[in-house]
Amino acid sequence: MLPTLLVLIPLAVENRAPISATFDVVDAPDPDSREQAIAGHGERIRAVLTNGTTGIAASDIERLPNLELIGALGAGYENIARDAAKARGIVVVNGAGTNDNCVADHAFALLLAAVRAIPALDRACREGLWREQLPMQPNFSGKRLGVVGLGTIGQKVARRASGFELEIGYHNRRPRPDVPYAYFDSLMALAGWADYLVVTTPGGAATHHLIDADVLEALGPKGYLVNVSRGSVVDTAALADALAHGAIAGAGLDVYEGEPAPPALLTGSARVVLTPHVGGRSPEALAASAALFVENATLHFSGQPVMTPV
């Protein structure tokens, strides 16, 4: 008999097949259906599949007495009540590594779009404006790129940067001996050095508003900021003020505070490029994450250690 899986997020048809072959699936992609599913099937649910945005609350975990495994589709797990899970001995896994290339690609798409003002130029062209009527944008290549958080995604961003002949520096809690890039022991020093600042650090309390008014001022009026980590890392009010007063030249954000509502302080600014937290979403990335969840579940329910515990 297959273990019962409660799925709290929408699943594409192509990703459902391998999961349905492993589990008896109960779908609950919205709050109302979640309540009905837990009330009607709570006793037999042994696994939950969610993501970092949807998560699962401690109160829901309490109502699932036979829950053994919680999986996050994708790398994020910030809204999963891990303390409640740990107290019950429930294993939590994520899709670490499955969307790294997608996120790094998207970071560069945002950076190029911001520096070369692609969205604004697209609108102008559609309105019949020609180049002499528009401000020129700077070269993208030959500049300095600072990576905030040189983990797997940060390293992929750095490797892509080399193709654009960018000089690369980074800030971490500690230097990495396995990389050739310049290490800055303070974020302020990195921001002062860089033309572009790409944020790929984890979210959470330790990085809340890590990018604040002082960092943006250090980045300077020719500097550009890109955030593909978590919205909480950037102080939205400080960024809006910096853009409005020309303290920085522009920004590209795939994540922002108050998701999913667009950031009201930023939507009116032509200096910022916004996308709705899609940096890690692609058919390839989601398929890889679904496959990894199945692999983790197979290991867990056969009594073996999982591959990507969090």
Image (cartoon, grey):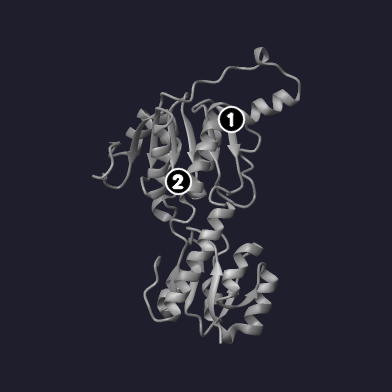
Using residue 291 as the reference point, say whether residue 158 is left or right of it. Answer: left
Tell me what residue is drawn at x 70 percent, y 24 percent: 124
Residue type beneath disc 1: Arg
- Residue depth check, mark 2 versus mark 1: number of the one nearer the observer: 1
Q: Residue at x 62, y 79 (%)?
A: 38
Q: At x 36% / y 45%, what residue is drawn?
A: 150
Q: Amino acid at mark 2?
A: His
Residue 271's disc number: 1
Which residue does the image show at 38% across and 35% down from the upper left? Answer: 146
- Numbered tag placed on residue 209 in the rendering: 2
- On the rendered image, what quadrant is the N terminus found in? bottom right
Left/right placement of residue 282 relative to residue 305 reads right
- Give the vertical position of 54 relative to 153 (above or below): below
Tag 1 or tag 2, which sits nearer the N-term?
2
Q: Say whether marks 2 and 1 touch (CB < 8 Å).
A: no
Position in image of residue 113 (x %, y %): 57, 32
